[in-house]
Image (tube, rainbow, N blue to C red):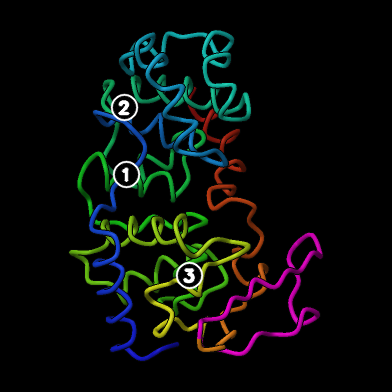
Amino acid sequence: MPSTSTQRAVLTKLAALYPDARPELRFTNPYETLVAVMLSAQSTDVQVNKVTPALFLAYPTVEAMAAARVEDVFPMVRSCGFKSKASHIVEACRLILIRHGGKVPGTMEALTALPGVGRKTANVVLANAFGVPTIAVDTHVFRVSNRLGLANAKTVEETERQLMDVIPRRDWIAAHHWLIFHGRRQCHARKPACETCGIALECACFNRPIPSVSAVQDDNSLSEKAAAGSGHGRAKAGALRAADEPNGAGAPDSAAKKENARKVRGTG
């Protein structure tokens, strides 16, 4: 792991590079936040933003969504992925109505007790709907934080814990957005633009040797070197894609799927 001073320098540069960092999902209240974040799993914010205006017009409240039929909701969100998203959203709203009087809960325990809501989704909702300091670790945050040396972890949970230790609590919510913006604009999964990166000199990945292709493989046994050099010939920014993916996870919230059947059965 880089020194504390280097990690602080990375955070300072991230803040300077992305003063516009903010949620790109569109929502106006906790209900809309929860639904939008649930739809965003394995989709894109751009795609979610295309479907939510009509969805929220048809189902503007928890009560309205709780009374909906999955068969009516799914066609409206089909472009965001699986039918299970529609069923999870409807069922989650029914449980919110029963357990919380129609108000989206503001605790990790209550949120993760809902179908389709894992720790990452809950953290995003807590931060953006309730202002609770959290660090939600999605695929961008996992990849970028481990490349930059803010974390050195194999799992989403480890990464979250390490980031909470490194980043001042007052910056947790902002840092989540800094890392996402850097991942989308610069530190891409397959071809990071290291040659134009404003944090290259502080980046742990940029300053370490590239491992051999045979050294690490991802879950599909496909390894890929993503190397880029600066104008000074420092082509040390390479990293195998396998090192950018949390162990055993196709998506940070995939563990939530295992809990859904149990959560639904427990509703009585």
Amino acid, disc 2: Tyr
Establish if 240 lies above or below 117.
below
Amino acid, disc 3: Glu
Establish if 180 lies above or below 99.
below
Side of 131 where 156 appears, left or right: right
Q: Residue at x 62, y 24 (%)?
A: 83
Q: Say which element carries label 1.
A: loop
Q: Say which element carries label 2.
A: helix
Q: Quadrant of residue 42?
A: top right
**Segment colored magenta:** 207-231
Q: Residue at x 21, y 42 (%)?
A: 130
Main SS class of the magenta portion in the image: loop
Q: Which mark is residue 158?
A: 3
Establish if 50 lies above or below 63.
below
Q: Kindly report the distance in space between the C-alpha atoms of the residues bearing marks 1 and 3.
A: 23 Å
Depth check, front residue: 88 or 264: 88
Side of 76 where 121 appears, left or right: left
Marks 2/3 in contact by CB < 8 Å: the verdict is no
Image location of residue 228, percent across then percent down: 59, 76
Image location of residue 43, percent across then percent down: 55, 38
Side of 120 where 165 appears, left or right: left
Q: Which residue is mark 1?
A: 23
Among numbered discs 1 and 3, the one appearing first in the sequence: 1
Depth check, front residue: 136 or 77: 77
Q: Which residue is mark 2?
A: 31
Image location of residue 8, percent across then percent down: 27, 81
Residue 214 highlighted magenta (yes or no): yes
The residue carrying pointer 3 sits among few (fewer than 14), some (14 to 19) or many (20 or more) residues within 10 Å by Cα, namely: some
Q: Kindly report the distance in space between the C-alpha atoms of the residues bearing marks 2 and 3.
A: 29 Å
Residue 154 highlighted magenta (yes or no): no
